[in-house]
Every structure is written in structure tokens, then in C-alpha cells.
Amino acid sequence: MRKDTENFVKSAAYDLDTAAHMLKTGRYIYVVLMCHLSIEKMLKAVAAEVTDTSPPRTHNLLYLTKLAGLSFSEAHFEFIAKINNASVVTRYPEDFGALTESFPEKVVSAYLEKTIEIVEWLKQNEKLK
């Protein structure tokens, strides 16, 4: 396994743990951001192994999915598209008050659960063995 791949996998786990802590403390916007980062880093890990090069510096999960040559279930792909869009508004909010109202605890809890499913699925990728 490439060194950068190893770092992406470890960092993704760290970000996922951070998301869980942010949920407990009510920092819901950061839950979404950390979930996105965790998926992003796992996709970069797979992409690094598939392409045998360092992945590009991008936050676009759809692009990284294609680069890694992955086929997600329809439900997981829909979530990846959803969180891909959500991460833009969490990074660059036009109206922070409206943003916080868009991501209550119930919504971000679901984001975290789905992210855990996807990260666990990505960990099982044959390229990461």
C-alpha cells in the first residue's frame, strides 16, 4: 500500500471520529464537513492505489469516485452527490443562520450514519488490502 494511501485511510478515520465528537457537542455544520472529508479521503486512498499516483487536490466526490473507478449502490451514490453539494454551502455559507437551520441534529445524525456505511464499504475495497 502506498504511503499516501495509508495516510488518507488514517486521516479519514480521524475525521470520522471528529464528526462523531462534533455531533455530541452540537457543532452540526462541522459534522457535515468532517463526513465529507472522511469520504473524500477514502476515495483518494482508493484512487491513489488505482492510478498509482497521488490524487488531485479536489473536494469533488463525484470526480474522485470516477477516478477511483468505483460503482456505488444507487442509495450511496445519491448520498455522495448530496453531501458533495452540502459541503460547498458549509464551507462558504451565504446565510449562516439559514445554514444552521438546514442541518439540525436529526439531519446530521443521518449524514454521519450514512458516511460510516460508505467509509466501511470503501475500507473493504480490494485495492486497500
Image (tube, rainbow, N blue to C red):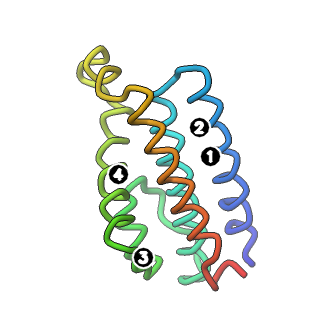
Instruction: Look at label 4 and name its amino acid.
Output: Asn
Q: Secondary structure at mark 2?
A: helix
Does the residue at mark 1 contact the one at mark 2 (Cβ under 8 Å)?
Answer: yes
Q: Tell me residue 125's x, y (percent).
A: 60, 79
| Residue positioned 64% across, 70% down in the render | 123
Instruction: Report the residue marked by disc 2.
Output: 19
Q: Tell me residue 109's x, y (percent).
A: 48, 38
Instruction: Point out the tag, 2 or 4, that comes first from the N-terminus.
Output: 2
Q: Please identify the residue farthest to the front as the structure is shown.
A: 106
Q: Quadrant of residue 105?
A: top left
Q: Secondary structure at mark 4?
A: helix
Does the residue at mark 2 contact the one at mark 4 (Cβ under 8 Å)?
Answer: no
Instruction: Report the residue marked by disc 1.
Output: 16
Instruction: Look at label 3 and name its amino acid.
Output: Leu
* Distance between the alpha carbons at the discs numbered 3 and 4: 15 Å
Instruction: Report the residue marked by disc 4.
Output: 84
Instruction: Report the residue marked by disc 3.
Output: 67
| Residue positioned 40% across, 80% down in the render | 71
Instruction: Point out the tag, 1 or 3, that comes first from the N-terminus.
Output: 1
Quadrant of the frame with the N terminus: bottom right
Q: Tell me residue 89's x, y (percent).
A: 30, 34
Above or below, 53 relative to 112 = below
Q: Is residue 17 left or right of residue 100?
A: right
